[in-house]
Structures are given as C-alpha cells and as structure tokens.
Image: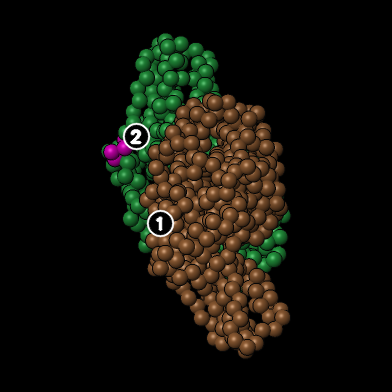
Chain colours: A brown, B green
Amino acid sequence: MKIIVQKYGGTSVANVERIRNVAARVIETKNKGFSPVVVVSAMGDTTDVLISLAKQINPKPSTREMDMLMATGEQTSIALLAMAIEALGERAVSLTGAQSGIKTDDFFSKAKIDSIDTIRIKKELSDDKIVIVAGFQGATDDGDITTLGRGGSDTTAVALAVALDAEKCEIYTDVLGIYTTDPRIVKDASLLESISYDELLEMAKLGAGVMHPRSVELARKNKMPLIVRSAFDYGQDGTEIIEVNEMEKAQVRGVTLDEDIVRISVPNVPDRPGIAYKLFSSLINLNVHIDMILQNLNHDGFNDISFTVPVDDLERILPTINAFVDEVGASPIVVKKDVAKLSIVGTGITSDVKIASGLFGKIYELGINIEMISTSEIKISCIIDQSQAKQALEEVHKYFGLNTQ
Amino acid sequence: MKIIVQKYGGTSVANVERIRNVAARVIETKNKGFSPVVVVSAMGDTTDVLISLAKQINPKPSTREMDMLMATGEQTSIALLAMAIEALGERAVSLTGAQSGIKTDDFFSKAKIDSIDTIRIKKELSDDKIVIVAGFQGATDDGDITTLGRGGSDTTAVALAVALDAEKCEIYTDVLGIYTTDPRIVKDASLLESISYDELLEMAKLGAGVMHPRSVELARKNKMPLIVRSAFDYGQDGTEIIEVNEMEKAQVRGVTLDEDIVRISVPNVPDRPGIAYKLFSSLINLNVHIDMILQNLNHDGFNDISFTVPVDDLERILPTINAFVDEVGASPIVVKKDVAKLSIVGTGITSDVKIASGLFGKIYELGINIEMISTSEIKISCIIDQSQAKQALEEVHKYFGLNTQ
C-alpha cells in the first residue's frame, strides 16, 4: 500500500465549490494507485468566528473548553469533504483527531502529539476507503479533546505521514510553493523548485509563513519527503523539500523580512559575570524566543544589553525585565518598535565571505544603518529600521539574482 | 449527592444572552444543593444550517458523515455553556456524547442508546464541577459518532437521569409546559399542572409536540420524575409528569390535532382470510406507523380497506401498496390528503360512555362528518376533513371545559 498524506488548509476548503475541487483531487490521487490520507483544516474563517463567539461569552475562556469549541471547525470540514468524495462515487470515512488515534499531552490549546495509534486508519485504508482526518486536534489519554496550536494541521499531516510510513506528505496551500521571498512584497519573487529542510526551517522561523517550523522540523527529523504546492492550480509542481545537497555551491536561496519584532535595550548593566545569563534565563523561563543579543561595552564597568523578541511577547515580559533592571541598578529600558529583521538564507552562505560582505555592502549602499547582526550555519540576519525594510528586501533579493527571468 | 438533570433545547441556547441565562439558572440549581448535569441541544437553527450545507455537497450524504457533521452543533453549545458558567465563577466541564459514556448501536442518524458508563460524569461531579453533556449524540463501540434521531436530546436527558439515579429530570423548553391543546391554535388552552406518563405519551404521539414519545416512554419505564417547564420564565412551575392517579375520576386532559396524515383507501379487495394481514405486514416491514384501519364490507365478496399513515411515509410505501393491489386484483387506490385526526386524551375516558358520545355529538352538531374512529385505553380519535379541523379542535376543547378560567 502506497500511502500519501495530503493536507488542505482553511482557504482550500472555504466553500462548497472548493471542497468539491479537493474531493476531485483526492480521487485523482487514488486513481494513480495511492492510498490517500487527507488532513483538513477548518473552513475559511470558521476559527475566527468561533473565537469571537467564545470571547463574547467569556473574555478568558478555559483552554479546555476553547479546544472543545475549536475542534468543531475541523470536524465540520472532514464530514463535508467525506460527503463530497462520496458524491463522486468513492468511499470515504472521516475521523476526528481522537478517532485517528492521535494522542497528545494535556496542554490544551498548544498540545504536543505523544503518539499515533494507526490501527483505525490502516483498517479503513485496507477497506479501500479514503481517510479524512481532522487536522489541528488530538485527544488526551482521558479522551479530552486537545488542539495543537499554531501550525497544528501541518503537524498533524507530517506526524501521520511518519506514523503511516507514507511515500510523501503534500501540503496544499493558497500559494504555488516556497518563494525566494514574500511575493506579496516583492513582485518578482521566484518560486523555488526545491529547498532543503534546514533552509525552509530558517525561512519559516524568519517569517516566510508558508509552513510552521514545528512541522518542518518533524519532517526533517524523520526524513519525510515534503511537497508544498497550490490547492488551486494542480498544474504546478510546487516546491519539493529535500535533504541538503552537500555538493551544491553555497548560494542564497531566499530573503525574508520579519517586521513583528521589537528591540529592547537595557542600558548601563553592571559588567559582572553571569549577569546577562540571569536576565536571559528568566526570560527563557517565560518561554520567550529571544532572537538577537548584543552586548556593548559602554563605559567603565557597564554594558548596554540589546535583544529582539516577538512583538506579541512584549507586554508579558516587561515586568520581568523591569524587575531585573531594579535589581541590578541598570537604567530604564528603551523599547524600539519600528525595527525589522532582514535575513538571507542558504546552505553554506556563512562560510562564503563574499556573500556576507555583499549583503552588508548592498545595505550600506542603500544608506541604511545595520543596528544588529546575527548569523547561523545557513542564515545572516540584520536588524534595520522598519521604514526602509521593504526597499532593502527588494534590493537584496535582486542583488542575489533571485528575481524571476 | 442529589443529582438533577436539566435539558435545554435549541431555542434556550440560541444566542449569547440566552446561554448566559441558562448558566445562571444552572448555578442557581447548584446553590440549592443539587449536583446539576445539563444536557443541551444545538444553538437555534444550527442544525438546519448544517443540513443545508451538507445537501449542497451531497444530496444523499451517508448517515455516518451526517452524524459526524451534526454532532458539531451540540459540541459548540456545550463548550459555550461551560465557558458561560466559568465566567460566573463556577467550575464546569463539557462532555461530548462519547466522553459522557453514552454507547449506542450503529444505526447512524437514528441510533438507540445501549448503555451509559457514568464513570466520567460521576468523577467530574465529585470534583464539584457542573457537567454539561451534548444532547442527541453518542458513540458506537468503535468510537464512531452517532446521533439519536428525533427527540434525541430529551432522550439523552432522561437516559442520563436514569443512569445517574437522579432526583428528577427537568426539560426546559420554549413553552410553559404541557397544555390541554396546542396554544398556537386554541388561544385559551390551559397549562396542565400535572399529567400522567400515559396521557402525555398519547398526546405526544398525537402530535402535541412538546416532548418526543421516546423520551416519555423511557421516563415511564424507569419511573423517572419529569418536569416540563419554561426556559424563559423560571417563575413558572411547568407541568409535572406523574404516575396515574387511580382514584381520579375519568376526565379529558387534552385535545390534539394531527394534520400530517393521509388516508389511503384500497377499494374492492377480495374478502379472503389473511388478505388484510398480508398488506399490513408488508407495510409494517417498511417500518410504517399505520394508525387507523377500517375494513368495510362493500359488496358481495369484496372489502374496502382504509387506513391512515404519516404523510412523510406516503411516497415510499406506494410501490408496496400498488404491488398488493395488482397481486390481489383490487381497484386502484384512493389517497385523501386533506384529512386530520382529532383526539381527546385522558385516563379512563373510553370507559365513560358519556365522554365518547359527547365527543361524537359535538362534532355532529358542528356539521362535520367523522370518517374513521379509533380508541385506546386513554384516547379517542376521529378522522375528519382538514378544512374543519381547527374549528372542531377549538369547540371540542371548550366542550370538555379545558379552556382557561
């Protein structure tokens, strides 16, 4: 049995017509000799409607009850997709997360998958049925319904593909695949035929937005072949996510821009061993992703510490930072909101000095000040002023030859 | 632990405001020292919206997938009601049919409850939580979601009350209780303080509509105290359903009208032993409720057979009846659609000749022809012309002194 897992996002099943299209696509896949397992998200804006309904009733609903509510969104789409497939004469069966054997921990609203018992799915597949699974959800050992949080449906798809030992996992979405940069900002962004897990991971983390890093990491760890492609134009092959080709010459594969960050500076921190560690460990305990850290020796015995965090985390971490400031006797913090992070991604690029110097040179040429720099194996990021960020993205994308034609 | 089961119908939870009211009512019940188990239906017209969505996708969706879809309606309302209760500072937990331990057979869309495993509900109650259960649904042994068909939420409530050995089961609805007749037709219908299970059963079967016979039968069998009362006016005590009071003088408790029937006549059926049995057994095999049967000796060796069936069953039974006509050589059938069944209900009324003759006399006085008559222990029904049915209902209701004041 050659199993293929296909995931269709909310826009792909947003109305009756689109659900019918997905049904036809799934049947086409079956007719090619595959056993399709189809993961779907909630229809269109269902999730937003449910959240707004809940907030009217309780401004702070418990996460358990939110999960109970949210899970109805995917349950609706799986039933409708199964009906659409049956209307075309094929046999189908829809399964909730719990029925699919997806066991999670009990961290409601951001549960993690513990295990998948595939008995039921395999039974339905061997009965020659197309299996439709509710994405984004699972159940605890007690049978309580959980949801998986951000990137949940992609994670369901990849985890199922791994558990079922599928041939591949196809992520159908509202774009043609993975681009060299955000095509909504840069008109001549190019579609990538292939990209490595690591590169996609960096792009995802840096805000490219097509797939959540969590699901990419899971695919990488299990070497599950992934394809990101269009739910609306099946003629397009999309982007294949592959293991890195070691022979490949270092080259920039994508340029990303993240404007949802803020820069926090703590001036005049006494220069004592472990003092920065103290600050960052307390923030890490709050589960904050601290991205770039800069420590400048300012003047005798004092440092300025700067770092970036996601803008959504700002409010909740301020008390912790201010407590630190009071404790060590630093100056009041400075928060700069109009910053952006421009990054280039590509395997091996940090070992090619021409690429780094080319990037910095181009930004300098544009008259833009680089406030912070950080690098990893496969990315180089610069913090720049937000007002010039889109122009920089466009120019850097062009500079590395990523534009179409 | 004094458990009380309360059931709130779709109109009682149709919007945010009403859900809040129900939450307050449930908490009030808890504060009186009861442990509430609350059964809710889907909000307002959710069910209709889901059905129409399904029909757009598949004119004949499979019942399994319909149940998967429909179950989201109640799952939404239980989550929202739990949130509303939590917003008022009480602890609550919502449970789907499956989570509540409601095991059914696998007749999707009209499943019957096989058993209820109350472990989970009892655990939550002993944790001092208010338990909210999705009405109308259960699960098979395989974990497939089923719905219970018509009267499903009432059945969930009564079955839970029985399984939990509850003090009583309260059915909250959009009317004040059980009336002597349909108050939408007869303006001065009286609210009954009490009525026996048997009388209510007859009224329900005859189309009075407040409670489905299935749930009343279950309550009667288990002697579960039932109260039907208003979800909008908690000041009203509603109607208590009691065992019959043997001492009570025979009296008419209610008058009902059922316009959703048709009269079928098969003329010139050869008068041979067992021939009527042949027709009716084949119809019973189709699961049709044949209500009234009249066999008239017509002329030498031939009978006219007439009977009534629910109008919804007409289409599907015609082929069977016509096959019978062909086989025995009877004349083509005559279907009369503009008929109605007027019934009076009350324990002991058929043994009081004054009541029966009073009914027939009154109808005669109104110049209405009685086409068929049937009686049971506690009811007398007449088939009359539909055009005069509402007038007859009003007059008969008055004749037996059931109007208010």
Count the labels in the image: 2
Residue occupying image coordinates x 70% and y 59%? B122
Indicate the position of residue B371 as horizontal and vertical percent values: 36, 31
Nearest the camera: A150 or B394?
A150
Residue occupying image coordinates x 44% and y 30%? B313
Structural distance between the alpha carbons of marks 1 and 2 = 78 Å
Q: Chain of mark 1?
A: A
Location of the N terminus of chain B by quadrant is bottom right
Q: Characterize the magenta stretch by its predominant secondary structure.
A: helix
Q: Chain of mark 2?
A: B
Residue occupying image coordinates x 60% and y 86%? A299
Q: Is residue B386 magenta?
A: yes
Nearest the camera: B265 or A36?
A36
Report which quarter residue A169 is drawn in: top right
Whether residue A323 appears in this view of the structure is: no
Indicate the position of residue B189 as horizontal and vertical percent values: 38, 55
Whether residue B359 appears in this view of the structure is: yes
Q: Which residue is mark 1?
A: A394
Establish if B41 lies above or below B272: below
Q: Which residues make up the magenta segment?
A: B384-388
Task: Determine crowd level at label 1: few under 14, some 14-19, many 20+ residues with C-alpha closer than 10 A.
Answer: many
Q: Which residue is mark 2?
A: B339
Same chain for marks 1 and 2? no
Indicate the position of residue A284 as horizontal and vertical percent values: 65, 70
Which is more foreground, mark 1 or mark 2?
Answer: 1
Q: Is residue B343 magenta?
A: no
Q: Secondary structure at mark 2?
A: strand
Location of the C terminus of chain B by quadrant is bottom left
Task: Determine crowd level at label 2: few under 14, some 14-19, many 20+ residues with C-alpha closer than 10 A.
Answer: many
* Residue type, numbered disc 2: Val
Looking at the image, residue A350 sits to the left or right of residue B357; the answer is: right
* Residue type, numbered disc 1: Glu
